[in-house]
Image: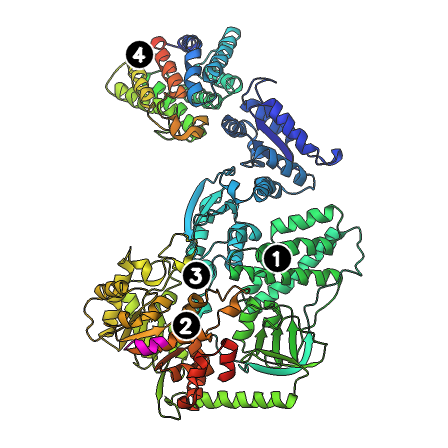
Amino acid sequence: MIGIVVVSHSRALAEAAVGLATEMVAEDKRPVIAIAAGLDTTTFGTDAMAVSEALGTADSPDGVLVLLDLGSAVLSAEMALEFVDPEMAARVRLTSAPLVEGLVAAVVTASTDASLDAVAAEAERGLVGKQDHLGVATADAAPVVEADRTVEVVVGNEHGLHARPAARLVGLVNGFDAVVTLTDLDNGKGPVDAGSLSMVATLNAQQGHRLRVGASGVAADAVLAAVEDLAAQNFGDAVVEKAAPSPGGSGLDVAIGPAVLAGAQVSLGDYVAGDNELGRLDEALATAGEQLDELRDNHGDIFAAHLALLGDRKVLDDVRASIAAGASAPAAWKQVYGELATAFEGLDDEYQRERAQDVRAVRDRVLRLLVGVTEVAPTDGILVVPELDAATAATLDATRIAGIAVRAAGTTGHGVIVARSRGIPLITGIGDVDVPPGAVVSFDARTGSFEVAPDEERVRATITEREGERAQAIADADLPATTRDGRTIDVLVNVGVVQDAVDARGADGSGLVRTEVLFGDRRTAPTVDEQVDAFRAIAQALGGKPITIRTWDIGGDKPLPFLPQDREANPFLGERGLRVFRRRPELLRDQLEAIRRTAAETPVHVMFPMVTTADEVAWALQELGPRDGLEVGIMVEVPAAALRVGSLATELDFVSIGTNDLTQYTTAADRTNAAVAPLADGLDPAVLQLIDHVVRNAGVRVAVCGDLASDPHAAVLLAALGVSELSAVGPQVPLVKAQLRQADLGRVDTAAVLAARDADQVRGLL
Amino acid sequence: MGVDSFVSWLRDVAGSLHDNSAYLTELDSAIGDADHGANMDRGFQAVVGMLDETSFDGTDELLKKAGMTLVSKVGGASGPLYGTFFLRFGTALAGADLTPEAIGKGLHAGVEGVLARGKAELGDKTMYDAWAPALEAYDAAVAGGSDLGTALTAAAEAAAKGRDATIPLVARKGRASYLGERSAGHQDPGATSTTLILESAARTLS
């Protein structure tokens, strides 16, 4: 067992701290604790000779941990190390841990025969509990573990420092002999221990946030360099995440099969606790670790996040403490991980909230091992789950499973992303509908319907029809989208990364190049040359057809790492899109230069996002300068812009309606907020009336580049309203074109649609 | 010039620090924990007690013993700092003729020890702000052919200037650093005691 030395200016303080700490541990399990404090019982001061004597008293082959108060205590202790035998000095560790909390943690941990490293680590974490309890506000006031060195890094990741990049950071940091802390300089949270995944997650660090990384310890410099390096690589998040989901699998949106229920709560009812619950826990953790190792090797980083959750030392400490207090291993595990999942659910960010399901997946994996139940992955039928964890989504046999029905809503969970990327038919948000195991169920994600005991023949007919549609649409992709009544609609593709343009089938160009996504993984602003290269590559991939480049559309939920913005109370009503550049136009000027240069080589249109007033249009045109044949437009997303589009468009060649933002601003509803998401329906007649108004009053070509244009039935309606250009996500382009070819726009009852009571009624009319 | 001169120096330092004890404590009460005068007085009175009981053959033994006494008796950060100074000074003088050059090397060794121990830099508002100009002036005087007394007088005068220059500084080390900007406007007690020690050296070592 290691020994402990307490160095303080005050004998009384040291003796009281030792009293507090030893109270925690039975007498026969206490480590040797030697005090070197005060020049005598009443005179404050430290004495290096006394410290070296105390080191001799506490010395142990396992090492000695020295806790200190301040100032001369540190100098005297360092000096004492020069007085003692160098061999002994080598096993002495001076810790920057807080004296009282650190000593309590050290004594408790040392009593378990833990190593010097482990005891020192626990002592350094001595303040975490108190900081946690008192909340963020006090964290700044109590930076007791002072970092020797700090660096600043930027979170470039699209979803912030979420589970996977956080797991990589935690894994990296724990490999160094250093205490590393993180502080989010933009939201003021922290400092937190960078070696604890749960603590890192509580930072809630979003894209564009600056983090101060502090490090103390012998490897401080090395760990900071490594963290800077990792941050420069977006914490290991590959850019490919932004690539369009490759179709693969059946890629259909309809499925039928016998229901396979999974993901039920693991029952602890039959569990009999023994006298070695800690041992059972360790065994289960080891097995879960092996399983996740293998899953990570085969299916990637999602499981690295699970592994990090499994090894989170703070959470494990809580579990072990609970077991030590008498709980059974599964009960302790379930409770602590359940609480962690709840904590994730309380975070501000939708994406972070959905990480709760990663926590529950890890919780249940270990619970199953503890209780001894195995979950066999279904091979056929439709998997019905409360929520879809990534492990399940990644390990299903995609060629055999008919589909997955998820009770929970939400479309950005790991599992949902994985299932989509594998082309597995999927529906989310089916709710609490009662599904008997084995009953035949079907769903149609296009109509949002989920049925128990459906008319099988009808569903199979739908599947055949969809397969045929899909095959035909892809075969016909390059044909123009000319309606039965002879109108040809240009159907273009939305491009976020160059690969979107490469993968696009049948697109008549790009109606939206999202420059903030194209360069969103960059840590520094791209040069004019780099922008020209990217724009040229997109145009070439689309065979030289026109591309519409939207200038930087940042703000709201889209920060750019190289253009940090102040936190706003209401970012969607704040400095977004063009508004951002009125005060600092440099980045916009560079981009317009790149657009003009690209336009000299290939047909290019430019459009400005988030325009509200004629003044803004005039300012943008002035910044653009001579047009030289460049077609110029604006996005219509703000209801004010839609209503006075005629006066905004006098100098323009086109306008493009962003239906997502126009819908949320018109309905005053955030579609990522489940409570109000149904209100934010793009087919709300009020939104359609605004689109109709824009078509009638713009006096220029009207395009639509929001989600509505990707829905084949809505696309027909938009064309009937007079929209001449639709820009859709890549995989939908052939389907939108196919639907338009079958449409007779003259037969769409636009008057009835515009006069409809609500979006549902509109759907009925389509 | 031998052990006796150094014994006289240490006794003179003890007297000077005792006389200035209240002054040093007053300086320390403005920006620290109001114990520098008492601590230094206690430490050097212990050195005097040690001198009364022990006789030394070598200067190095004398200075090292004085250093160890300070380490144990001063209590505050100046204990390990001045303790280290005298220990290193003594070690450097072992076996050397007490020429101005050798004593210069000893002073440098002592001050390097202070730096290694306290990790202070110039301008941190510490005793080093007096030591650094003092060493420079001492070296220049010796290089110009001055004798020990003249060189030490130059060092003491430079230390006094360095001490005065600590007044506007913001402390970055020690207890005073907790005061931040409020530490500006006060003379550093450590630089003051260093100056007293050098002034005493100029009086006694020549």
Nearer the viewer's eye, disc 3 or disc 4?
3
Amino acid at circle 4: Gly
Relative to A728, does residue B149 appear above or below in the rendering? Answer: above
Residue under pointer 2 = A659
Q: Secondary structure at mark 4?
A: helix
Give the magenta part as a residue range: A693-699
Q: Is residue B78 left or right of residue B149?
A: right
| Count of numbered circles on the image | 4
Residue A406: within the magenta?
Answer: no
| Label 4 crowd (10 A; few <14 / some 14-19 / many >=20) | some
Tell me, yes or no, whether dots 1 and 3 are on the same chain.
yes
Residue under pointer 4 = B149
Query: Gap in Å between the C-alphas at discs 2 and 1?
Result: 34 Å
| Label 1 crowd (10 A; few <14 / some 14-19 / many >=20) | many
Find out whether the residues at labels 2 and 1 contact each other: C-beta distance under 8 Å: no
Tell me, yes or no, whether dots 1 and 4 are on the same chain.
no
Position of the C terminus of chain B, as image quadrant, is top left
Find out whether the residues at labels 2 and 3 contact each other: C-beta distance under 8 Å: no
User: Chain for mark 4?
Assistant: B
In this view of the protein, can residue A229 be seen by the observer?
A: yes
Amino acid at circle 2: Thr
| Label 2 crowd (10 A; few <14 / some 14-19 / many >=20) | many
Q: Is residue A3 left or right of residue B154?
A: right
Nearer the viewer's eye, disc 1 or disc 4?
1
Relative to A603, does residue B65 appear above or below in the rendering? Answer: above
The first of marks 1 and 3 along the sequence is: 1
Residue under pointer 3 = A557
Residue A697: within the magenta?
Answer: yes
Q: Is residue A448 left or right of residue A655?
A: right
Residue A488 screen position, x and y as percent: 35, 88
Nearer the viewer's eye, disc 2 or disc 3?
2
